[in-house]
Image (cartoon, helix red, strand yellow):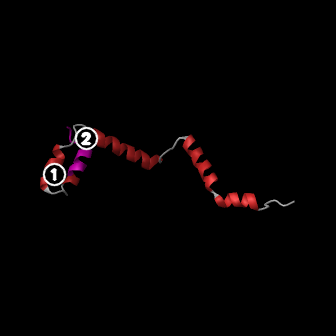
Amino acid sequence: MAFGSGYRLFLSLVRLLPKNKTKTLVASLPRNFEVSLSGRSKGCLDWQEQGLNPPQIVLDQVVTYKTEMDSIAQFVEQECDINPT
């Protein structure tokens, strides 16, 4: 396993653990730990820069849900004469 920045970060955090737990934890890391951590770090950075970017169908469903759950707007529409003639 290469010792990249992700692995070094992990090791710096591991120093906070008691010594008997540290050896067990480091020994139990999967071989692809650094790649996995790197991918997760990139995903986190992408999310911070771009947000979630949900698909259009999800955005449409949120609008539909909010409209259906807006009881005040439903009351006003049903019980109030907004444009009297």
Q: Amino acid at mark 1?
A: Thr
Residue sitting at x 55%, y 43%: 58
Residue sitting at x 36%, y 43%: 42
Question: What kind of element bears circle 1?
Answer: helix
Instruction: Let me know if residue 4 is in the magenta part.
Output: yes
Residue sitting at x 15%, y 48%: 24
Q: How many marks?
A: 2
**Relative depth, front residue between 2 and 82:** 82
Question: What kind of element bears circle 2?
Answer: helix
**Relative depth, front residue between 69 and 35:** 69
Would you name the residue on which mark 1 appears? 22
Q: Is residue 10 above or below residue 74?
A: above
Instruction: Let me know if residue 25 is in the magenta part.
Output: no
Q: Which residues are drawn in magenta?
A: 1-11
Q: Amino acid at mark 2?
A: Phe
Residue 82 coordinates in the image, percent (x, y):
78, 60
Q: Which mark is residue 33?
A: 2
Residue 22 coordinates in the image, percent (x, y):
16, 51
Residue 7 coordinates in the image, percent (x, y):
23, 45
Choose the circle earlier in sequence order: 1 or 2.
1
Q: Is residue 28 above or below residue 75?
A: above
